[in-house]
Image (spheres, grey):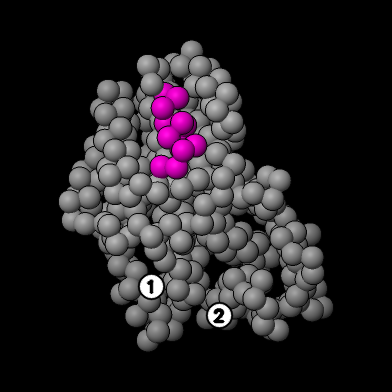
Amino acid sequence: MIEVKTGGKLYIAGEYAILAPQQTALLAFIPIYMTAHITPNHRYQISSDMFSYSCDVITPDANYALIQETVAVMEEYLLACGYAIRPFSLIITGKLERDGVKLGIGSSGSVVVLILKAMVALYQIDVSEDLLFKLAAYVLLKRGDNGSMGDVACIAYESLLAYTSFDREAVRHQIALHPLPKVLASDWGYSIRRVTTSLDIDFLVGWTKQSSISKEMIKCVKKAIDTTFLSETDSQVLRLITSLETGDKLAVKTSLETISTLLEQLSPVIYNEQLKRLKMASVDLDCVAKSSGAGGGDCGIALSFDALSSKKLMERWREDGIVLLLKERLSFL
């Protein structure tokens, strides 16, 4: 039996703007994992702890449709590479939730990358992080996913990274017209780059315990996005990345505060009451906090620049009923 894992992701900056082509976002990999166990078998058998039953890859099943689609795409790729297809047993565990409420750090991207990694391990083939990203994005685009694919990039690369988005409608058009190998070989127009910082930063993740549905939030907020929001957000995200790399703490804090304000102005639904408390907890401390991702619940993040500020922030979060999911050194990512 072969075991593989995938983690989650959270946006530090660039949410919503990243939905437009050629915008940049900064994302952090979250080391809270889903696990897959895969082994050769005489027939396909797939099970997930999300559901009380298993299925195969042939019989249509609404609950397992994403997994079935991922297996089908990966087998199409394997056939194109000359591999003989063989059935397997696949067991998926790790719901990325607590007490039945999702954490908001994972996504359909986590599931897709997990299955791809399991099949890569089973067939013992070399797949680059970039190809893993493209295969996962291909699956989601084919299924009509409305996300930017930044989550997929972060989960595939398992790193703090800068992601510049591509024209997803153009790639969907390619998928409809061309075979998988040709689509994978084409230049989609995105950029993925690992980011490092010389600053001594605590990266903290706070969970509101309130679930948010990203797809629904995107539908609600997307119509408010205009060219001003895009240009101002992109300018601040690029400044933030440069400031992290050059060690300019004041610029990091200023850019994140500006990006947070832009999100608040974009739509009132992004900062619900818990996320407002999560952000306000950083006032008068040497740190900066904001919502992460689609908003409306799930998680927020903070960058803290000294141990005392981190301690006080965590105390304030706890008093406000916000759960600390993660605390780690950003410079070590």
**SS at circle 1:** helix
Q: Is residue 4 left or right of residue 148?
A: right
Point 56% across, 49% down: residue: 211
Q: Is residue 117 visible?
A: no
Point 40% across, 80% down: residue: 175
**Camera-side residue of 330 and 55:** 55
**Camera-side residue of 49 and 83:** 49
Q: Which mark is residue 185?
A: 1
User: In the image, what residue type sits under mark 2?
Assistant: Glu
Q: Dividing the picture into quarters, in which one does residue 283 lie?
A: top left
Q: Is residue 73 left or right of residue 171?
A: right
Q: Dividing the picture into quarters, in which one does residue 327 lie?
A: top right
Point 79% across, 69% down: residue: 53
User: In the image, what residue type sits under mark 1?
Assistant: Ala
Q: Which residue range is magenta in the image? A: 271-282
Report crowding for label 1: few under 14, some 14 to 19, many 20 or more residues within 10 A (C-alpha): few
Q: Could you tell me what secondary structure mostly forms the magenta stretch?
A: helix
Residue 273 within the segment the image draws in magenta: yes
2 or 1: tag closer to the N-terminus: 2
Q: Point out residue 136 in the picture as x, y percentages from the top left corner.
A: 50, 65
In the rendered view, tell whether residue 323 sits above or below residue 222.
above
Report crowding for label 2: few under 14, some 14 to 19, many 20 or more residues within 10 A (C-alpha): some
Q: Which mark is residue 76?
A: 2
